[in-house]
Image (tube, rainbow, N blue to C red):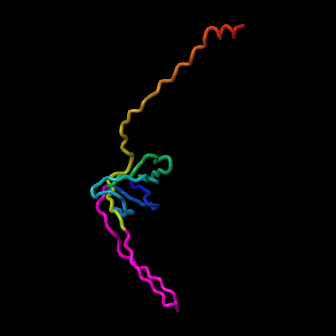
Amino acid sequence: MYAIFENGSKQYRVSVGDVVKVEKLNAEVGATVTFPVVLIADEGAVKVAGEVAGAVVTGEVVSQGKDKKIIVFKYKAKKNERKKQGHRQPFTAVKITAIGEAEKKAKKTATRKKAAPKAEAPAEEAKAAE
């Protein structure tokens, strides 16, 4: 069984037990995070769109870090222009613990009683009968 979830304008294919590097999240190491599901595939059956509404991928934050450094070098010929920069993209490593339905917490919802239709006054009924 695997799922595809979306985070930070990117989509990730995961199974239970995978460790995935996603865009940096504001979560402590050891915290539980959830992601909305785009697609779930299980033994030949594929569910998408409305079929996976409410489904989530749950994971545990393993670490926070930075990726390898990349070099950005800008150069303009014959102008003596050179600019060298480095960049390290921050990430969050998440270990996938579950794929499926979100835990639904029981909420008490106030039920409103429908108001009974107002009975017309007897005087109005008498006028209508005439």
Is 87 a magenta residue?
A: yes
Above-or-below relation of 81 to 123: below
Q: Can you give x and y, in whole percent of width and height, for residue 116 in the image? A: 53, 19
Most foreground residue, 44 or 127: 127
Name the residue at 41% across, 79% down.
85
Q: Report the quarter where the C terminus lies.
A: top right
Viewport quadrant of the N terminus: bottom left
For the image, the number of numbered tags is 0
Identify the residue at the far bottom of this view: 78
Front-most of residues 123 and 108: 123
100 shown above or below 25: above
User: Looking at the rendering, which quadrant does residue 125 occupy?
Assistant: top right
Q: Residue furthest right?
A: 130
Q: Main secondary structure of the magenta part?
A: strand
Question: Residue 63: horizontal and vertical position, in percent?
Answer: 29, 62
Residue located at (39% from left, 46% from top): 101
Whether residue 67 appears in magenta in the rendering, the answer is yes
**Residue 48: x %, y % from top left:** 49, 51
91 sits to left or right of 119: left
Task: Name the spot of residue 27 as percent of width and height, x first.
Answer: 32, 57
Q: Please state the extent of the stretch shown in magenta in the rendering.
A: 60-89
Check the image and name the residue furthest to the left: 30
**What residue sits 46% from the left and 86% below the top?**
82
Judging depth in this view, the residue of 60 and 76 nearest the camera is 76
